[in-house]
Amino acid sequence: MEQRSTIRNIKGDDMGDMSEKKSQNKLLERAFNILDSFSLDKKEQTLSELSRAVGLAKSTCHRLVSTLIAFGYLSFDESSKYYSLGPKLFELGSVVYDSISLRKIASQHLNDLLAKVGNKAIALGILEDDEIIYVDRKEDTHNPIKFSTTEVGRHRPPHFGMFGLLFMAHLSDEEVERLLNKYPLGALTAKSITDPAKFKEKLKEVQKLGYSFDDEGAFENLSGVAAAIRDGSNSIVGGVGCSFISASVNDETRQAVISAVCETAGAISRSLSKMVLPKAISGRR
């Protein structure tokens, strides 16, 4: 008899746990329904409007919205008595945005570019904290010539190579001056631009062309082409670059590479512009 009683108690505990879980799930479902009732056309609602929208009694609805306010998922305006979505949702949206990184969005486009141009190195770069950072690269594994100039994670001065010309061409005159003072130009090769005035002229040329072309200014015998990636607000958030051995291209093939790089930058920009998200890519220009 004692064993049966124990079994009944265990079953009773299990039933209690299941009932509690169902109750918790119901509360979560109701809370999510409240959040889902907001939209671009319905940014603010009174308690009466919320209770009607989710089919709850005002007292039940009030308890739920009070909890959502406490955790930052809803806000309440005392003067108007209207509820709206809270700052916590903006924070979570920002996390979602950052998880859908530029690298993820650009990856297939970079692969497609590599397939078009062949034995060259493709890079994805950003300007962050006054430095160029390479965030991705694509290279033909069968290419006997390996490029170490665009290793992922490598940092470079803001005026360095194809990305330096590209990014600095889209900065204000004051920013260009500040960066050149912070990172003075140096002679890396025989073709490096070391005169600030000539460098600024080169930046104007990049602005007119819509892309940058570095002719052995960063590395001997290596050239590079880069084009800007823009987000939905038309802000530059990165660049696509293609590095190649200078002697491996003629005028015709160089122009084909330039066109392919610009097309790829445009394709990535269009992919970014389709994303309706709460903020620009953190820390990127």
Image (cartoon, rainbow, N blue to C red):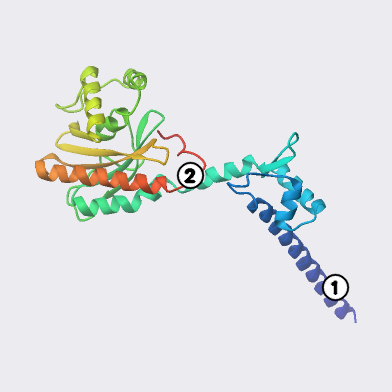
Neighbourhood count class around disc 1 (C-alpha, 10 Å): few under 14, some 14–19, many 20 upward: few
Nearest to the observer: residue 106 or residue 16: 106
Residue 157 in view, yes or no:
no
Determine the image quadrant of residue 219.
Answer: top left
- Residue at image position (30%, 50%) is 110
Q: Position of residue 244 (x, y in %)?
A: 18, 43
| Label 2 element class | helix
Nearest to the observer: residue 181 or residue 86: 86
Whether 227 is drawn above or below 183: the answer is below
| Label 1 element class | helix
In 3D space, how far apart are the residues under numbered discs 2 and 1 (Cα atoms)?
A: 49 Å
- Residue at image position (35%, 38%) is 238
Q: Position of residue 53 (x, y in %)?
A: 70, 55
**Disc 1 target residue:** 9
Q: Is residue 42 left or right of residue 231?
A: right
Residue 36 in view, yes or no:
yes
- Residue at image position (55%, 45%) is 93
Q: Position of residue 124 (x, y in %)?
A: 32, 43
The amino acid type found where label 1 is placed reads: Asn
Neighbourhood count class around disc 2 (C-alpha, 10 Å): few under 14, some 14–19, many 20 upward: some
Q: Is residue 150 left or right of residue 237?
A: left
Sequence-wise, the earlier of marks 2 and 1 is 1
Quadrant, the N terminus: bottom right
Q: How many marks?
A: 2
Q: Is residue 84 left or right of residue 210?
A: right
The amino acid type found where label 2 is placed reads: Asp
Whether 180 is drawn above or below 50: the answer is above
Quadrant, the C terminus: top left
Determine the image quadrant of residue 3.
Answer: bottom right
Residue occupying the far bottom of the picture: 1
**Disc 2 target residue:** 98
